[in-house]
Image (tube, rainbow, N blue to C red):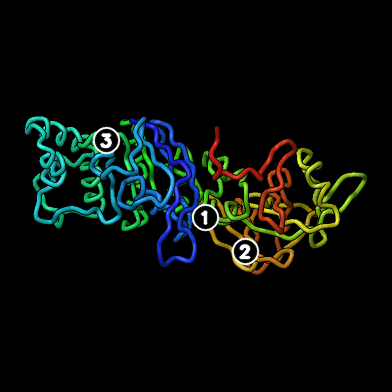
Amino acid sequence: MADVTLKNVGKTYENASANTIESLNLGIISGEFVVLVGPSGCGKSTTLRMIAGLEEVSSGEIWIADRRVDELEPRERDIAMVFQNYALYPHMSVAQNMSFGLRLAGMDKMEIRRRVEDAARILDITPLLDRRPKQLSGGQRQRVAMGRAMVRDPAVFLFDEPLSNLDAKLRGQMRTEIRRLHKRLKATTIYVTHDQVEAMTLADRVVVLNQGRIEQQGTPLELYERPATRFVAGFIGSPTMNFLPAKVEMAAGKPVLKLEGVTLQVPFDRTAALAHYVGRSVEIGLRPEHFLAGGAKDFTVSVDMAELLGPTTLLHFSFAGVSCSAMLPPEQAAAEGSHQRLRIAAERMSLFDTDTGRAICADGENALTDPNQQGD
């Protein structure tokens, strides 16, 4: 295991109009499982490939433990990478695929056999050791690719969208396997995905990238409950967050939020911050579960569509001129084409500056800190 540190790392391509990665600073603690997530083109795979040595850095430094590695060859960095397409040799058996790198390094045959057998036992692929890749399912091939990485006993594991070729059921199973494997090996792991569900379920810490910059980083719950920007709020969470326009007004000496006939009291910890927005518009962020079944005094919406999801029902409707969704228990949800009374859990809402997209934070917090700046 080893720490991984990126110091002002940048990547520029000759024909690109802008940097793919600009001055990225990131510290990963030994044994931590960190997921890099973001939309296509945000720079997450490029970042991983620079750590692996498959892409050269244009600026900055990459450190693994106490060694600067950005000028070293991939084989000298003490990393192992699991690719999206498995990258298995079709003419070799499972055991030969897993041991290939060790044989090239000239390792003792008995030690190679021990490592392969140990990894196969952990991954439950011992019966497959004599098979060829074409005889395996997608999930089995992914286990073999993971086993090939494990036998090297690297300081850092790198995963580049390893589950994107699997069906939904198998992805869920493999997420469990990867998390269980990390808990057993306690290895430093950097995992890239565009799937925010994978990020939320696997990570100790999630790093959200947007246009080559870190938008926010933190535990999955921190990003879900306290998104620092509108981008993070909209990207993390499924179904996605609802965004509603509102105006800040004063009532009884305190700021309140006005939207389509509804007045929302501002949570106490954000009254001071919102006092600066009186007379201006802001954006309210509400997750579907932040809409609650209401009573006679609450507002009413017309249900356009109702999706029964088992333990919950997802209602789709228009409110404040915006298409919204609410997640309610089935017994509290109105039928499609009928009316639903709702209220808003104002204490759980997020608030965003409409000009900057930054969160309007609780008193004493600062959402304007740039997460890309290098700390002391």
Where is residue 265 drawn, in percent x and y?
81, 47
Q: Residue at x 55, y 61 (%)?
A: 307
Q: Nearer the viewer, mark 2 or mark 3?
A: 3
The image shows residue 29, relative to residue 80, as above or below, that is: above
Where is residue 309 drawn, in percent x and y?
51, 56
Amino acid type, label 1: Asn
Label 1 secondary element:
strand
- Distance from Cα at disc 3 to Cα at disc 1: 29 Å
Quarter of the image with the N terminus is top left
- Distance from Cα at disc 2 to Cα at disc 3: 48 Å
Q: Which residue is mark 3?
A: 154
Is residue 73 left or right of 133 when viewed as pictured?
right
Within 10 Å of the Cα at label 2, are there few (<14), some (14-19), or many (20+) other Cα atoms?
A: many
Amino acid type, label 3: Pro
Of residues 23 and 143, the one drawn nearer to the viewer in this rendering: 23
Specify which label sits upstream in the sequence, 2 or 3: 3
Within 10 Å of the Cα at label 1, are there few (<14), some (14-19), or many (20+) other Cα atoms?
A: many
Is residue 208 left or right of 55 when viewed as pictured?
right
Of residues 38 and 371, the one drawn nearer to the viewer in this rendering: 371
Q: Which residue is mark 2?
A: 316
- Distance from Cα at disc 2 to Cα at disc 1: 28 Å
Of residues 76 and 159, the one drawn nearer to the viewer in this rendering: 76
Q: Residue at x 13, y 41 (%)?
A: 99
Q: Which residue is mark 1?
A: 210
Specify which label sits upstream in the sequence, 2 or 1: 1
